[in-house]
Amino acid sequence: STSDPPGAMALFSPVALLSLLVALLAARAHAESNATRGFLLAATRDPIARLAKKASPRDELGAILRDICSTPYPARVVVADETERAAVASRRPCDKIEPWVLPAGRRRRRAQNLPLRHFKVAAVAANAALFPGGTLYVDNDIAVNRPLAGALFETFDDMARYRKAVGLTKAAKCEPAHHKLEDVPGDFCEHNGGVVFLDGSRRGAAIAREWLEALERHTSSDGHDQMPLRDVLWRHRDALLDLPPTLQCRCKKEDICASGALLWHLHRDDRRAATRAGTKRHGAFKMPRARRAFLPRREPDPAVGFTRTGGDVRRVHG
């Protein structure tokens, strides 16, 4: 007589089937979160002019787009007109990058020193709810810690847990002398507007629109967008999740970036210089193994990898 092979019944036991179902549901949820979350960028004339399909020392926009293409997440790049849209479409490193023209009515400009930052904030306001699971705006001068992109987007899980609509890190200077606001306490610090997490809700979109309106009404003498952002965040402080400074490294010393940061927020030339300095300190073939792991194969850009993964990455989120 025939008999079932050993373990066959165990394979189809209720416990095993339940475990399989849980794993399948978790995989499906992960795939859906990737599809409903993504990056947002704003690009003006000069970065678009330097955009190239292959790595180039002057191409800051292309560097971060290649980082994004190595992750499971899509991205929208906001541009000013159809000519720029066509240029990005023809030179983008992968199809998950979507160039999108900002409607003309949203490109209002109040002063000559505001075009770049005004365009950026207008792009954020127009796309705050682009991805229903969460939209992450990033400046062009940022490198993504590619292997930890999933941990980066888990910030949206933290925001949902604490019912927050926006997430930002505090600026290096809490309240610059020329950024003072009468109605905002001095100990409520400015936040860095180069990395903005928006949860996809109406509340998050309203905060982004208020940021644009505040920028159009007034800004600091240096034309920065952080002073009006501080005004808006103070009014909506109950919706703000203060993210730890370790989320983005803003240093010019490569070894300081070994703290587990998920983003390196520094112009590409400075990142390359820091990487070269690190090579001199450690030796060409003696760089920390984990840091070198951020360098993808056949990627001739030594500045795409910037940090070691040591420790529990969830500690980055507190």
Image: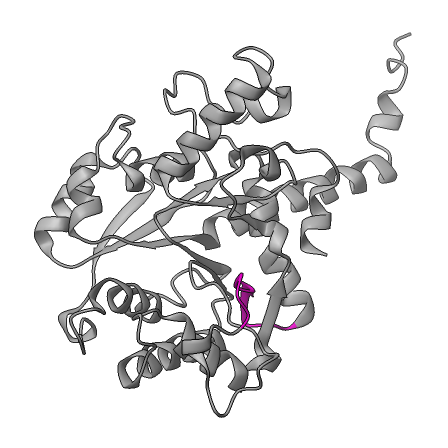
Rendering coords of residue 111 (x, y %): 17, 75
The quadrant the C terminus occupies is bottom right
* 169 horizontally vs 244: left or right: left
Above-or-below relation of 296 to 310: above
Which residue does the image show at 11% across and 57% down from the upper left? Answer: 81
Main SS category, magenta section: loop
Which residue does the image show at 89% across and 19% down from the upper left? Answer: 7
User: Which residue is at the front of the view, 41 or 25?
Assistant: 41
Which residue does the image show at 34% across and 69% down from the upper left? Answer: 224
Quarter location, residue 16: top right
**Residue interval drawn in magenta:** 163-174
- Queried whether the magenta region covers residue 14, the answer comes back as no
Above-or-below relation of 196 to 106: above
Above-or-below relation of 210 to 77: below
User: Which residue is at the front of the view, 29 or 151?
Assistant: 151
Above-or-below relation of 290 to 224: above
Which residue does the image show at 48% across and 23% down from the upper left? Answer: 295
* 7 horizontally vs 25: left or right: right
